[in-house]
Amino acid sequence: MSVTWPLALLALLAVPLLAGAYVWQLRRKRRRAVRYSSVALIRAAAPRRAAWKRHVPVALLLAALAALGLAAARPRLSVDVPVSEAAMILALDVSGSMCATDVQPNRLTAAQTAVRDFVQAQNGDTRIGLVLFAGFAQVAVAPTTDRAALLQAIDTLTTGRGTTIGAAILKSVDAIAEINPDVAPADPGDPGPGPAPPRPAGNYAPEIVVLLTDGANTRGVEPVDAAQIAAQRGVRVYPIGFGTRNPTSMMCTAAQLGGRGVEGRGGYVGGGLGGRNYLVADEATLRQVADVTGGQYFAAADADRLQHVLADLPRTVQTQTRDVEVSVWLAGLAALLVLGSMGAAARWTAFPA
């Protein structure tokens, strides 16, 4: 258990002080009591009641003060939450490289089929969001249980130029921040994320990001820098590197090109700035993203492997750790203790014991 305001725990010092004052007052009364010659007469006149009962109201009141003192510190308990009760963001690469036909009929079609099956297989209470990225990243569907909206967005994917993996991570963090007040939104305007601060083991947001890409970042914020921002917010990223290392041709349908007609290119030989092949998943960077955020990297060279990775993902991320504030429960307990104290006082201290 952790507390948000530890200095508020100093209020608990009032409980032993008040308890000591109560005991001192009882002893003081005993010393001033009038001594009667006949103890038997006093016992006969006094109500037959256990002596401890007159202390119950004070004990309950002190317990209520202790509960309020703890509540003021805003204690938080870490509990395991099934992923089905949380949410996940699917960040999908829709760059032009998804037209590569090394995965039949092409990468985009294979990814659409696998992601569609994955969405349909999830618990109906699981909220799923969809972030699409090519030259820029956008939230296509905010986290929802509406499977129809998700499937429609998946079925109508179109490609674009560029690959902004870092921006997709930041946009996914923003989507999570919209539904989880404990996760701060990403701020790409920061001068720099710096290293992620150390986190207690398992201290993550219950929501996760599943990022599927077949290439390397070509513009915008670097993926590892974006991963640092996600890590600072406790958001885990599970990257999936899709496609083979030897794409030879590209072919997209008119629908996948946004109505621009059918595009095909053959005999592609990989290359890029500094010899980087932007049609091949940048596994080194994706592994770094997973390591920084506390996630796990998966490689999927073909459609069957992608289906297998997605099918196993809920078991890989079976539970998440969520910090639950219990201040309200402690305040409610304090109220019940106060009521109990008042009831005990009315019942047992109407006459001196």
Image (spheres, rainbow, N blue to C red):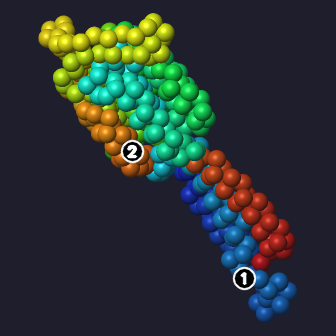
Label 1 residue SS:
loop
- In the displayed image of the protein, which residue is found farthest to the bottom? 40
Amino acid under disc 2: Ala
Q: Are marks 1 and 2 in contact (CB under 8 Å)?
A: no
The residue under the point 77% across, 69% down is 344
Quarter of the image for residue 291 reads top left
Whether residue 211 appears in this view of the structure is: no
The residue under the point 76% across, 60% down is 339
Taking the image as shown, residue 297 lies to the left or right of residue 45, namely left
Label 2 residue SS:
helix
Q: Quadrant of the C terminus?
A: bottom right
Foreground pick, 177 / 71:
177
The residue under the point 56% across, 27% down is 152
The residue under the point 65% across, 70% down is 27
Q: Could you say which disc has been placed on residue 187 in the image? A: none
Quarter of the image for residue 96 reads top left
| Mark 1–mark 2 distance (CA, rounded to whole Å) | 66 Å
Taking the image as shown, residue 37 lies to the left or right of residue 315, namely right
Foreground pick, 258 / 115:
258
Percent position (x, y) of residue 53?
72, 75
Taking the image as shown, residue 138 lies to the left or right of residue 229, namely right
Percent position (x, y) of residue 243?
27, 27
Label 1, on which residue? Answer: 50
- Numbered disc in front, either 1 or 2: 2
Q: Does 22 sit above or below residue 207?
A: below
Amino acid under disc 1: Ala
Label 2, on which residue? Answer: 311
Percent position (x, y) of residue 310?
38, 40
Foreground pick, 225 / 192:
225
